[in-house]
C-alpha cells in the first residue's frame, strides 16, 4: 500500500469539498478499495471517509419508499429492513461474511458495481432511486455495465430510495470460492408489474430479464416462465461456470425466487 | 470408562490456549533489533529468458541495502531432490539445478529471480517494483499441459531435457509382462481416465523466514516456517550454502499449518541467510498470500489411465495404471518420491490383487513445483483404485459393498506381501467396513433417498475402502528405493533434578497436538502427571537429529524413539533403586511411578530416584554415571498400514448441479489410539481437505501459464458449512505389530480415503436418478461441472 492522506468529514458538503481535491477518492467500508490498495492496484492520494456523516446513515420509511443511507452497513440493513423490506434484508444478510457485513456499505457496493454484487439486483428490481450529492438517478439509468455507473467523478451517493414491492425475493447461487453471486435473481412484484433483475451472469453487469417480467406480470407463478429460454450470448464464462450454465441458473433461480416471494 | 489421563485419554490440547488467545509465537511475530526486510522479485510470465536486470536505479532508492539476483548464487549449490528415481531403462532421473534465485531463465509465474533488502518493508516493496520495471525478460512459449510437454520436444522447461520428462518409472518393471497377460486374459476390463486435481496447500500461516548472522562467532541462525528444522539445516548447510552444519541453527517456532508444503527447503531461506551475512543484520521475509499461491509447493496433479481386469462377478485380477505426474518447473525435495514410492506401492489397496503394474512419467512444466501434500501419492492411488472399482460395479451391475468384501484381504492373510512391494503387517478390513455400514445406516438409505426425491434432490451413497503406508519410513528400505536420507527419528528424555521432565523430540508440531499427546505417553509410562512433562521441539540447537513431521510419522517413529528412551530411563532408574534399596537389580520392578523390590513393600518413588541421580550422595558412582537423561533413535522396521472404510451420502440438485454432503462416516483402524479427541480432530481435518479436493479446490493455469486461481476469490477452500457433522470411529483397531506403541498414524487418513467416497456418491446419485450416461466427473465436482455432465 502506498501512503495517502486521510480525511473524515462529518457533513456531505464537506465531503464534496474534500472530493474536489486532485487524487481524492471516497472510502466507505473499504472492503473493495482497501484490498485493491494493498495490492497496489489503486493509489489514491487522499481518502475521504464517508462513514462519519450522520446524513448518510440508517434505514427508515420515507417519501417514495425505504430510505437507506449510502454509508449504512450491510449488517444494519439486514437488521433494520427485516420488517420493512424482507427481501432486501435477506440480501444484505447474505453478503460476504460477518466481517464484510460489519464494514461494507450499500453506497460502496453500488459505486463499485461489481458484476457479481448483490445490491445492484435489488436496486434494479425495486426500481429504486440512487440519490447523490447533486441529483437523483433512476435505477434503469444508473447501471451502465461491469464496474461502470452513471456517477460523475467526485460524485457521492448519499442514499438509495427503494419503493417496497408487494412481494419480492432474492435467490443467490454462490460462486464457490468468493461466495459472491455466481448468478442471483431479484424478483419484485409491484402494483404496476413485475421486475426481474439478474446479477452475476452477464458480461454487461446487472440486467433485467424482460421476457420473464412480461410473463410474470401476467401470471406470478414459477410455471409462467417454464416455456422461456435464456440466451447464453453475452453471459460470463469462467472457471466456475460456462455461459450456458449461467443462462440455466437465471431461469432456475428466477423460478425459485417467484416461489419464495412474499 | 474413558480415561482422564495418560494413554487413551482425550486430554485437552494444552497448546490451544496460547493459539486461541493470540499468544502463539510465529516467525513473523519476532521483531529483531536492526532487522531489514527482504522482498522477492518474481516472474510474471511462466517461461522467459532473463535478458537483463539493471539494478542501478533500485540500489539508489531510499532505504535500499542490497539487491540480489541469480548471479549472486551461481557459485552455491542447488536445492536438491531427496530421492533418486530410476527410469524403466535404468537411467537416473533428470535433475536440473534448482537455484536460490532463477538464473538465465524464469520457469513459472512466481519464480523469484531477484530480491531486494531495505530498511522497511514498504521501501523494499517499492524497490522490488522498480527492479521488476528495470528487468527485461523475453517471454518464451509456456509448457503447461503435461501430455503436450512430453510430445513437444522443441519447447523445453530446462534446455538440457528434451522431452520434459524427469523419469519414466515402472513398478514393478519385471512384473509388467505378467500383468499385461493377466489383463488380456481377464473376462472383463474396465478403463477409466481421470485427473487428480492440483491443490494449493494454503496453510493459514504463510511461509516466513528470518536470517541472522553473528559477526562475532560466524554463526548463522535461520528462523523459519518448517515442518522439519533438522532436514532444512542439512539441506541449507550441506547442499545449498556450504555452511558447516555446526555453524547453523534452524528454529521452527510455532508454525501455523503445513500439510506438506513446509517440509521443503525454499530459496527464500537461503536468501535471508546470505543477506544477513552480507549486511551483518537480521533479514526477514514473509510471504504475502499471493506469493503463497504462486510459490508454495502445490500438491497432487496427476493424469491417470487406470485399467482393471476382473471376472464377471467382480473378482479383481489385474490392475494397470499409466500416470503423468506434474513436478512443475523444478524438483522440490520429495517431489520424485511422491508419485512413485508413495503412490505405486499402494496400487493394490486393501485388496488381494494378483497382478499390478504402475507406470509414472514425471513431467516438467512451467508451473509451480509440485510435492507431497497431506497424503502425498496415496490419495492419488486410492482415488484411481476406488473410482475404477466403482465403475466396474456399475458396468457389471454389482453391489459395491459386496465387491469390496469379495476382494478385501482377510485377517488370516497377514502379514501380506503385496504385488507392489509392501508387507502389510496387520489389519481387519471387514471389521471397519461392517462398522461403517452400521454407523452410516446403509440399511436405511432407501428411505432417505425417497425423502430426498420428494424435495427434487437426487441422493447417492459412495464407498471407499482404503489403506495407506505411513509412519515414514524404514531407512534400509527407502535407501534401496532411492532415498538420499534416513527416515528414523529421535527423542531425548531429560528427567530434571526435581522430577519433572523435558522431552526433546525430532518431530515437529504445526497443528497436530504433540505438546499434549507426547506428555500423555510419558506420564502413562513413568507414572507422573501429564503436567510434569514438557515437549521441546523445532530448534536444532536443542533437539536431537530427527526428521520432523510428515507422512503420519510423528507418533509411530518419534513416539517410538521416545518410548525407547524411557525404557533406558527406567533401566537406569532400576539400577539406582537397587543401590538405594539394597536389593539386586533383577528384583526391582517399576510400576505406577514407583521402583519396588518385588515381593516387599520397599520402594522409591520416581522423584526420589531422579533426585538421587542429580544429588548422588548415596549412589553407585563407581558403576553408574549420575544424571537421568537418555536419547534414543528409532528406525522403524516397516511402514505402518492404517486402513478404513468411508461412506459418504450426498444430495445433488439436478437443476443447478450443486452437491450437498448429507453425511460422512469414517471407520478407521489406526492401531492403538493415544488421544481419541485428537485423532478425531485429525480425521475431521483430513476428511475436510478431501471434501475440499473432491468438490471445491481447483488450481488452474491457463495455456500461457498464468495461475487463474491465485487468490481465495477463485480458489475455493472448504468452509464449515461445506462439510457435514462427521461420524468418526476408530474402535476396530489392530495394533501395529512392529512399533512399541502399536500405533499406525492418523494424520493423512482422512485426505486419502475421502475423495473417492464423495465422487462415487455423486455418480451414484446421478445413476439412481436415471442419469446413467454420466460415467465420471473430474474433481472438483463443482456445480457447473455436474450440470454440464448432466446436460452434456
Ligand atoms: C470477502 C468478501 C466477500 C464479499 N461478498 C460479497 C457478496 O457476497 N455480495 C456482494 O454484493 N458484495 C460482496 N462483497 C463486497 C462488499 O459488499 C463490499 O462492501 C462492497 O462491494 C463495497 O462496499 P464498501 O463500503 O466496502 O466500499 P469501499 O471499498 O469503501 O469502496 C468501493 C468503491 O466505491 C467508492 N465509494 C464508496 N462509497 C461511495 C459513495 N457513497 N459514493 C460514491 N462512491 C463511493 C469508493 O471510492 C470505491 O471506489 C464482498 C467483499 C469481501 C471482501
Image (cartoon, coloured by chain):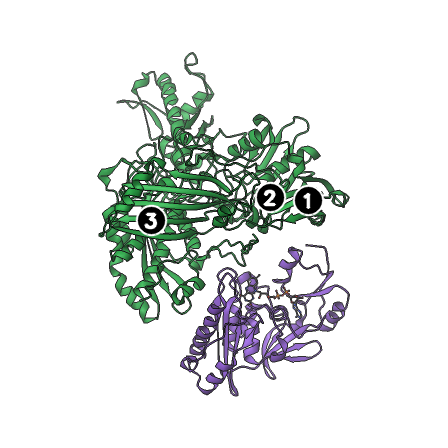
- Tags 2 and 3 both on a single chain: yes
SS at circle 2 = helix
Q: In this view, does B737 lie above or below B399?
A: above
Mark 2 vs mark 3: give the one in front: 3
Q: Name the residue under label 2.
A: B29
Instruction: State left or right for residue B366 relative to residue B681.
Output: right
- Tags 3 and 1 both on a single chain: yes
Q: Of callouts 1 and 2, which one flags the residue occurring earlier in the amino acid sequence?
A: 2
- The chain containing the residue under callout 3 comes to B
Chain A on-screen colour: purple
Disc 2: residue Cβ within 8 A of ligand 1's nearest atom: no
Q: Answer few, some or many: residues within 10 Å of disc 2's Cα (few below 14, many 20 plus, some between 14 and 19).
A: few
Chain B on-screen colour: green
Q: Nearer the viewer, residue B543 or A142?
A: A142
Mark 1 vs mark 2: give the one in front: 1
Please tell me the numbered disc located at residue B307.
3
Whole-number angstrom distance, CA of label 2 to CA of label 3: 51 Å
Please tell me the numbered disc located at residue B51.
1
Residue B200: x, y in percent?
50, 50
SS at circle 3 = strand
Whether residue B708 is visible here, answered yes or no, is yes
Amino acid at each position: 500500500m502506498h501512503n495517502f492522506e486521510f480525511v473524515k468529514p462529518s457533513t456531505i458538503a464537506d465531503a464534496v469539498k474534500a472530493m474536489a481535491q486532485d487524487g481524492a477518492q471516497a472510502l466507505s467500508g473499504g472492503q473493495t478499495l482497501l484490498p485493491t490498495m494493498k495490492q497496489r492496484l489503486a493509489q489514491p492520494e487522499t481518502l475521504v471517509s464517508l462513514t462519519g456523516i450522520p446524513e448518510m446513515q440508517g434505514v427508515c420509511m420515507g417519501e417514495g419508499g425505504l430510505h437507506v443511507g449510502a454509508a449504512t452497513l450491510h449488517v444494519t440493513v439486514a437488521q433494520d429492513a427485516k420488517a420493512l423490506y424482507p427481501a432486501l434484508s435477506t440480501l444484505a444478510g447474505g453478503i460476504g461474511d460477518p466481517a464484510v457485513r460489519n464494514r461494507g456499505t450499500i453506497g460502496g457496493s453500488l459505486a463499485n458495481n461489481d458484476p457479481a454484487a448483490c445490491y445492484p439486483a435489488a436496486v434494479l428490481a425495486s426500481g429504486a432511486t440512487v440519490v447523490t450529492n447533486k441529483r437523483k438517478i433512476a435505477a434503469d439509468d444508473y447501471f451502465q455495465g461491469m464496474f461502470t455507473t452513471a456517477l460523475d467523478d467526485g460524485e457521492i451517493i448519499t442514499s438509495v430510495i427503494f419503493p417496497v414491492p408487494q412481494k419480492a425475493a432474492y435467490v443467490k447461487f454462490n460462486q464457490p470460492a468468493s461466495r459472491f453471486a455466481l448468478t442471483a435473481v431479484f424478483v419484485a412484484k409491484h402494483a404496476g408489474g413485475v421486475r426481474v433483475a439478474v446479477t452475476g451472469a452477464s458480461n454487461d453487469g446487472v440486467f433485467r430479464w424482460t421476457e420473464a417480467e412480461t410473463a410474470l406480470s401476467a401470471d406470478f407463478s414459477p410455471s409462467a416462465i417454464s416455456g422461456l429460454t435464456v440466451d447464453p450470448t453475452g453471459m460470463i464464462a469462467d472457471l466456475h461456470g460456462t455461459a450456458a450454465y449461467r443462462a440455466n441458473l437465471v431461469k432456475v433461480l428466477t423460478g425459485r425466487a417467484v416461489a419464495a416471494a412474499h | 470408562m474413558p480415561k482422564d489421563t495418560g494413554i487413551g485419554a482425550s486430554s485437552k490440547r494444552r497448546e490451544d490456549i496460547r493459539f486461541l488467545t493470540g499468544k502463539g509465537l510465529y516467525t513473523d511475530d519476532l521483531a529483531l533489533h536492526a532487522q531489514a526486510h527482504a522482498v522477492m522479485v518474481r516472474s510474471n510470465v511462466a517461461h522467459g529468458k532473463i535478458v537483463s536486470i539493471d539494478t542501478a536505479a533500485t540500489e539508489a532508492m531510499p532505504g535500499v541495502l542490497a539487491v540480489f539476483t541469480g548471479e549472486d548464487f551461481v557459485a552455491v549449490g542447488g536445492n536438491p531432490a531427496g530421492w533418486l528415481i530410476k527410469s524403466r531403462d535404468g537411467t537416473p532421473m533428470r535433475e536440473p539445478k534448482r537455484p536460490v534465485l532463477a538464473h538465465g531463465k524464469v520457469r513459472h509465474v512466481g519464480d523469484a529471480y531477484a530480491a531486494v533488502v531495505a530498511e522497511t518493508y514498504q521501501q523494499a516493496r517499492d524497490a522490488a517494483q522498480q527492479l521488476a520495471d528495470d528487468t527485461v525478460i523475453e517471454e518464451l512459449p509456456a509448457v503447461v499441459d503435461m501430455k503436450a510437454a512430453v510430445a513437444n520436444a522443441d519447447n523445453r522447461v530446462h534446455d538440457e531435457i528434451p522431452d520434459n520428462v524427469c523419469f519414466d518409472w515402472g513398478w514393478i518393471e519385471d512384473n509388467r509382462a505378467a500383468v499385461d497377460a493377466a489383463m488380456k486374459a481377464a473376462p472383463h476390463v474396465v478403463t477409466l481416465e481421470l485427473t487428480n486435481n492440483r491443490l494449493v496447500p494454503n496453510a493459514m500461516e504463510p511461509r516466513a523466514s528470518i536470517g541472522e548472522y553473528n559477526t562475532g562467532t560466524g554463526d548463522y541462525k535461520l528462523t523459519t516456517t518448517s515442518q522439519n528444522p533438522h532436514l532444512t539445516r542439512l539441506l541449507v548447510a550441506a547442499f545449498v550454502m556450504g555452511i558447516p552444519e555446526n555453524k547453523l541453527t534452524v528454529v521452527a517456532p510455532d508454525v501455523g499449518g503445513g500439510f506438506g508444503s513446509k517440509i521443503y527447503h525454499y530459496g527464500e531461506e537461503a536468501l535471508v541467510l546470505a543477506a544477513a551475512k552480507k549486511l551483518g543484520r537480521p533479514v526477514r521475509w514473509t510471504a504475502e498470500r499471493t506469493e503463497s499461491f504462486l510459490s508454495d509447493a502445490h500438491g497432487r496433479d496427476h493424469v491417470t489411465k487406470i485399467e482393471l481386469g476382473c471376472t464377471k462377478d467382480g473378482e479383481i485380477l489385474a490392475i494397470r495404471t499409466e500416470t503423468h505426474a506434474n513436478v512443475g518447473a523444478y524438483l522440490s525435495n520429495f517431489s520424485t518420491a511422491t508419485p512413485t514410492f508413495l503412490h505405486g506401492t499402494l496400487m493394490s489397496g486393501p485388496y488381494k490383487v494378483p497382478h499390478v503394474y504402475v507406470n509414472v512419467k514425471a513431467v516438467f512444466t512451467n508451473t509451480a513445483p509440485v510435492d507431497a501434500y497431506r497424503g502425498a501419492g496415496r490419495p492419488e492411488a486410492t482415488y484411481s483404485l476406488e473410482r475404477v472399482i466403482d465403475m466396474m460395479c456399475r458396468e457389471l451391475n454389482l453391489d459395491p459393498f459386496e465387491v469390496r468384501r469379495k476382494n478385501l484381504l482377510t485377517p488370516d492373510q497377514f502379514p501380506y506381501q503385496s504385488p507392489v512391494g509392501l508387507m502389510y503387517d496387520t489389519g481387519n478390513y471387514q471389521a471397519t467396513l461392517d462398522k461403517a455400514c452400521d454407523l452410516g445406516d446403509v440399511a436405511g438409505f432407501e428411505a432417505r433417498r425417497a425423502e430426498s426425491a420428494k424435495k427434487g434432490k437426487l441422493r447417492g451413497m459412495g464407498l471407499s475402502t482404503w489403506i495407506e503406508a505411513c509412519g515414514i519410513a524404514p531407512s534400509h528400505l527407502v535407501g534401496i528405493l532411492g532415498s538420499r536420507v534416513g527416515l528414523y527419528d529421535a527423542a531425548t528424555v531429560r528427567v530434571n533434578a526435581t522430577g519433572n521432565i523435558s522431552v526433546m523430540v525430532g518431530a515437529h508440531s504445526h497443528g497436530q497436538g504433540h505438546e499434549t499427546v507426547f506428555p500423555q505417553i510419558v506420564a502413562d509410562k513413568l507414572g507422573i502427571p501429564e503436567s510434569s512433562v514438557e515437549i521441546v521441539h523445532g530448534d536444532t540447537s536443542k533437539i536431537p537429529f530427527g526428521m520432523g513431521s510428515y507422512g503420519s510419522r510423528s507418533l509411530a517413529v518419534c513416539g517410538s524413539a521416545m518410548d525407547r528412551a524411557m525404557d533406558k530411563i527406567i533401566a537406569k532408574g532400576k539400577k539406582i533403586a537397587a543401590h538405594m534399596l539394597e536389593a539386586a537389580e533383577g528384583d526391582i520392578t517399576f510400576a505406577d511411578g514407583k521402583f519396588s523390590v518385588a515381593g516387599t513393600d520397599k520402594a522409591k518413588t520416581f522423584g526420589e530416584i531422579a533426585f538421587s541421580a542429580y544429588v548422588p550422595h548415596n549412589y553407585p558412582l563407581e558403576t553408574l554415571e549420575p544424571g537421568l537423561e537418555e536419547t534414543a533413535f528409532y528406525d522403524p522396521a516397516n511402514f505402518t498400514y492404517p486402513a478404513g472404510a468411508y461412506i459418504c451420502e450426498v444430495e445433488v440438485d439436478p437443476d443447478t448441479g450443486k452437491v450437498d454432503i448429507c453425511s460422512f462416516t469414517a471407520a478407521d483402524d489406526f492401531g492403538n489410539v493415544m488421544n481419541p479427541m485428537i485423532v478425531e480432530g485429525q480425521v475431521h481435518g483430513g476428511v475436510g481437505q478431501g471434501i475440499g479436493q473432491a468438490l471445491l479446490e481447483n488450481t488452474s493455469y491457463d495455456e500461457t501459464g498464468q495461475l487463474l486461481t491465485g487468490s481465495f476469490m477463485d480458489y475455493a477452500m472448504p468452509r464449515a458449512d461445506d462439510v457435514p457433522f462427521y461420524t468418526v470411529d476408530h474402535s476396530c483397531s489392530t495394533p501395529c505389530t512392529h512399533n512399541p506403541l502399536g500405533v499406525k498414524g492418523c494424520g493423512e487418513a482422512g485426505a486419502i480415503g475421502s475423495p473417492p467416497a464423495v465422487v462415487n456418491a455423486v455418480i451414484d446419485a446421478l445413476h439412481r436418478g436415471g442419469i446413467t450416461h454420466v460415467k465420471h466427473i473430474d474433481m472438483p465436482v463443482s456445480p457447473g461441472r455436474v450440470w454440464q455432465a448432466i446436460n452434456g
